[in-house]
Amino acid sequence: MELKIKRWLIILFILTLMARLILAFAIPNFTYDSYFHLRQVEHIKEAGFPIFEDELSYGGRVLRFLPFFHYLIAFFSFFLPLEIAAKIIPNLLMSSLTIIVYLISYKVTNNNAASILSALVSGFLPILYFTNSFSVETLFLPLVFLAIYLFLNLEQKKCQYLYIAAFLCLSLTTPITIILLMGFLIYLLLSFLENKTLARSELELMFFSLIFFIWVQFLFFKEVLLAEGIGFIWQNIPRQIIQQYFPSFSIIETLILVSIIPFLTGIFVVYRSLFKSKNETALLLISLAISTSILGWLRLIQFKLSLAFFGIILSILFSLFYDDLSSFISRTKWAYLKKNLISAAALLLFISMIFSAVNAALNQETPSDKDVAAFKWIGENLPPEAKVAALLEEGHLVAYYGKQKNVMDDKFNLIDDVEERFVNLNSIFTTPLHTYAVELFDKYGITHIVFTERAKERLAASNFQYITVDCYERLYEENVKVYKVKCALQENV
Amino acid sequence: MSNLKKYIQHVVKFQKSYLIGLAVVILLIPIIVNLALGKPLLMGSESYYHLQQTREFNIGNFYYFPLLLASLIIPPDLMVFIPFLLAISSILLLIAVTKESSLQGEFIFFFLLFMILSPEFIHNYSVLSANSALVFLAVLIIYLISRESKWVKIMSIFPLIAASFFNLFSTSLIILALAFYSYFTKKNRLIALILAALLFLSGLINLLALNQDVFPIEFQEQPLITGLISALGAVGGISFFILLLALIGLAVTWKKKFFWIAYVFLLILMGGYLFNQKLIFLMSIVITFLATVAFAFLARQEWKLPLIKNFTLFILLLGILFSTLSYLNRANLSYPLAAHEETLQWIKENTLPQALIFSSPEQIHYINYLAERRAFHNLYKDKEYAAGQYRAVIGALQLNELISLLDIHQISIIYLTPDLKSSLPADYGLLALLNTENFKLVHSYQGIEVWFYSKIVNEEVKN
């Protein structure tokens, strides 16, 4: 790599990292689901292993998940305070995508300028600006593209071993690695249709990846598979909120989140690669784009993750577009414009993406400081046998800051009565009937209830409707209301 | 690698000892688990169905005579060794038969190894199953007709006729197998054709005279995919890795001449499986065969990345073993539990013989055999009608509605297992209605409850 290019790449990486870190630290807390991972990392740090038998979630349940991400962050948390590490490391990982995308793009186009532009696109893709999300996806995305890069360089022995290592990590990070395997399958199919013979080593590694991935998933999710059968794919998500996890495809949202230029150029490149030029490396990338689209469309992976993956593929494909465009311009009478093409493209891309990216970051759903303070107060003041009813998304906050049992959170696997519980939890927040609420408190052993600012906003109400002085004691005198439940149904008293 | 080859050659050389040893260990595990937990050694609804048939022995089910004889000699708990012996005999016969075939020793070893490790094999040879007897008879027929002596060949008529008493589908499969055999063999062509014709005749007589079923009797109902894959909670099922290998096997053998026979059987069995899940065992044999072809192909093939080759084959074996262990791990959950036996024994001793018991369909054969009482589902031959009435009872919301259904069917006892209870709403419906004065909880043991319906409670209780 030329020194100048290396320098540009480092500048781009630092620029992306700075932008992400500024946004991450400007927004005070993490996204709601992050608190689950924070708790796991904290436990690994203390005890050496994750919480597979969780006494707090749902008041006590069995949890199954892949722990590589948590171990990785636990390692870094020995050198940095956990909440700082949880902001820096994921953003560092996401920023590394610029380098990985550059490498893949360069492999595809052999064009430095085009590859730098691709790196720029990946650095500021709005869909990737979940800067306050401490989630597995922040490791998955760079790792999966690293694996793809290594796969494209299998002719080097070093890359073969590195690919195996990357794939092992991926298999232990998230089941969504299935995107890669599905992509391989489509790649095989497209290659067959195009009469292209694949290298033996490619086939061997694909097969190995498939077998290893399935084996690891069986090892970790044995109970989930047995309990939920084929339904494990949909993670036992209650029907009422499945639309939230797997929303229908919206072209407008897609255009905003992956930005209009990479989207349109990507579609153009896919068309050209499939039907006109027969770029072999692009075929794998297109297969991956098809794979993520199919899985997203079939609601097998969450829409946002599918879009994030798709966005990165588009950013790589942008290099092909730019490569074609610049060679086209050099053949025209406007060849003198080629000199300024990269600057103009970079500026256009940057302007078209930065506002959406910042907007996406600012619109992340995070708890307010007041809500967090209330949950911290719960952790310090409630007795250990308490069970706290909070909104579904606040379940992990109850367990992480509150250190109390929650009624429900968004880890639905292996929960028998998940739909009934979801309906009942909502009823606790919306019912005007005191007796019905008390019946539910009895049913789930709820001792305390919390009405946060988030609940106010979501339910357009200022408090529970059934609060009476006799039955509920207000414990926390701030914006957030924490009540102790003092009544029970007559027969149970 | 050379060491690995040496080991494989060694186990192939002594495959009989290794495979029998493995089968003995694997099949003993559920028995030991049941013994340790104080459960009846004989598991599965099917076992109790067949034992009940021996009690109801008559001209219509005369083919249960061998089992009747066995049940008179062997105590019920030791009956579990019948499928165990069938497994060992079938393996020994298969080794003897395949030894004389053109199949390679390694191939036979891995085929039998995968078969023994398959959850479907363990399931079928841990219960008194018709499948285990059918496979034994089929292998015995092939063994006998492949012998040199003419008289021994003629002896194959007996297992052949016995094999025709199972169901029309399996009879047709054996006829097809004999037809293929006659097509490929020169030596035994005539005898194979005669046997196929005899079997056809016997099957026809069974169909007309005994009104034989087309498909085997099903004892569990599961969604098709769940019932197919062991890891998804199938009662037996096939390892996912075996299925995956079988797909590769299909691709590998696609253009090879001999394998069209496997495709024919696979297609027929897959078609049959759509209608009857009991056929999964026979389907698993064909699938395991194709999986072995794929495994042998992957092992023999030169790989560009030899390290990956060894690692992949190792993971495949681990994956297959994982399904086996995962299935054996579930052995403690198999029915009947000690609590079922205790409660059904209580019913047998404390209720009148004509009492009719309402419970979930999975409990029918345990009720019949262990409590020696009729279950609600025994009343009706029309399964759909019985299922509809069953749903009406468990879904009844009003007391009048429930009482009228119980009176219509003359149900006097409700036998509630934890499974049935967990599938019902606690606050309304059957469980809530049981807490009215018409019903009385007369026995409760480890979550299993026996309720008497009060209208006839005095008539039903002996004391």
Image: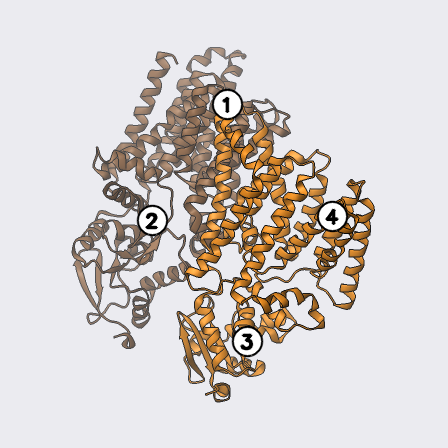
Towards the viewer: B81 or B122: B81
Mark 1 burial class by Cα count in 10 Å: few <14, some 14-19, many 20+: many
| Picture layout, residue A227 above or below residue A259 | below
Determine the CA span between mark 1 and mark 4: 60 Å
Amino acid at the residue labelled 3: Glu
Q: Colour of chain B?
A: orange
Q: Is residue A286 left or right of residue A429?
A: right
Q: Is residue A203 left or right of residue A43?
A: right
Mark 1 or 2, closer to the camera: 2
Q: Are marks 1 and 2 on the same chain?
A: yes
For disc 1, the marked residue is A321
Amino acid at the residue labelled 4: Ala
Which quadrant of the rendered structure holds the N terminus of chain A? top left
Mark 4 burial class by Cα count in 10 Å: few <14, some 14-19, many 20+: some
Image mark for residue B372? 3
* Identity of the residue drawn at 27% across and 46% down: A39
Determine the CA span between mark 2 and mark 3: 45 Å
Towards the viewer: B205 or A322: B205
Amino acid at the residue labelled 2: Phe
Circle 3 sits in a helix, a strand or a loop, which is it? loop
Mark 2 or 3, closer to the camera: 3
Q: Chain of mark 3?
A: B
Q: Chain of mark 2?
A: A
* Identity of the residue drawn at 30% across and 58% down: A59
Circle 2 sits in a helix, a strand or a loop, which is it? loop
For disc 4, the marked residue is B177
Which quadrant of the rendered structure holds the C terminus of chain A? bottom left
For disc 2, the marked residue is A52
Q: Chain of mark 4?
A: B
> Which tag, 3 or 4, sits closer to the chain's start?
4
> Which tag, 1 or 2, sits closer to the chain's start?
2
Disc 1 + disc 3, Cβ < 8 Å: no
